[in-house]
Image: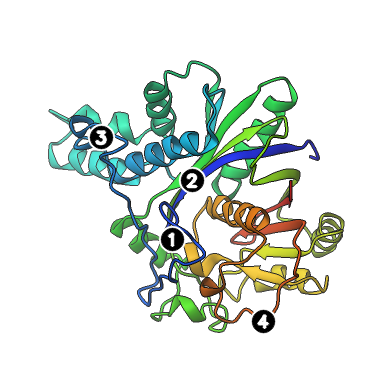
Amino acid sequence: MKVKCYIQGMAAISPQQTFNGDIFSAPLVHTDSNLLPCIEPDYKPFIPGNSLRRMTRVLKMGLTTALQCVRDSGLDTVGPIVTGTGKGSLQDTEKFIREIEQYKETALNPTPFIQSTYNSVNGLVALQLNATAYNNTFVHRGFSFETALLDSMMLLAEGASNTLTGAFEEMTAEHFYIKSRIGFWKQAPTDSRSLYEQLSPGSIAGEGAVFFSLTAAPADNQYAAVTGLKLLYKPTDEKLADTLATFAEGADLILTGRNGDNRYEHYYQQADRLNIPQLPFKHLCGEYDTAGAFGMWLGANILRSQQVPAQWFPSLEKVPATINRILLYNHFYGEQHAMIVLERV
């Protein structure tokens, strides 16, 4: 899809210090536990205390990120709210299932069930902002965020003035253990700073919440324009190579979702043949269903500031002096492949 839209505002809670302050001076946060948890901000300026104590992590993260994004955009009204998530609220889901067994299906507290639904973040955001427009959550594994982005671009093309588009994901100890049993994570402790040098089965886990305020019209101080989006499900090598070559045309930089998993590294090696400088970003946020949203947030920051946060990329050798166009290429365990083109405005 090549309908253009513009990033008016954005916000991110991630394993790096991305919510407050200047990312170009923020130190690189790393781990050797194979899990990159989010650095959570103080939620009290955003959420009343009596509501805060009843909310789980992903609800706090999602709602706070959305509210900060709206502040950053400066928009007075919020249009459609469209999000993507791979797992929704894992903490509430696990609590509800645990209580079913504990109380033998009697006297269950309905709150964890209500808050475990995938669209609970959207509902909270709409209630907080008094937003009554279109509201939708996509749960499409590795395509969750990208489908929300596609839906938002279609809404803008049909006349919506702006959309609040985002993605959120959390990791729990139980889910980390389950995914480790089916080969999602590396078996040996891996320093995230050397993730791409230690190729082996699995990656490192991550989580995060990212929101964008998208508009159909250009304006001052926008971060970037989204000018292209392509989703491929289990493409052949030939199809992937052809699509990458098409979408990389004119790109000054490629952001890749390389994650140190040698089972799927060959897909990213297709991008190596394009002879365009690359930056992998999974050592910053870890691997999760909607990590592509973090990549898009990073790309938009680079385009507006015309610089790369060098401290986050210790092995960085050289990037173009001027970056006008970025291709973001990410895939989720070799199945869902997504390409997003970002341009300077």
Mark 4 vs mark 3: which is more N-terminal? 3
* Observer-nearest of 271 and 200: 271
* Observer-nearest of 258 and 117: 258
Mark 2 vs mark 1: which is more N-terminal? 2
Alpha carbon of mark 4 to alpha carbon of mark 1: how far? Answer: 26 Å
Q: Is residue 246 visible?
A: yes
Disc 4 on helix, strand or loop? loop
Disc 1 on helix, strand or loop? loop
Q: Which mark is residue 112?
A: 3
Rendered location of residue 136, percent (x, y): 53, 27
Residue that label 2 marks:
11
Q: Choose top left, top right, bottom left or bottom right for residue 329.
A: bottom right
Rendered view: 94 above or below 67: below
- Is 224 on the left-hand or right-hand side of 191? right
Residue located 65% across and 69% down the image: 279
Residue that label 4 marks:
317
Q: Choose top left, top right, bottom left or bottom right for residue 34.
A: bottom left
Q: Amino acid at mark 4?
A: Glu
Q: How many marks?
A: 4
Alpha carbon of mark 2 to alpha carbon of mark 4: how far? Answer: 28 Å
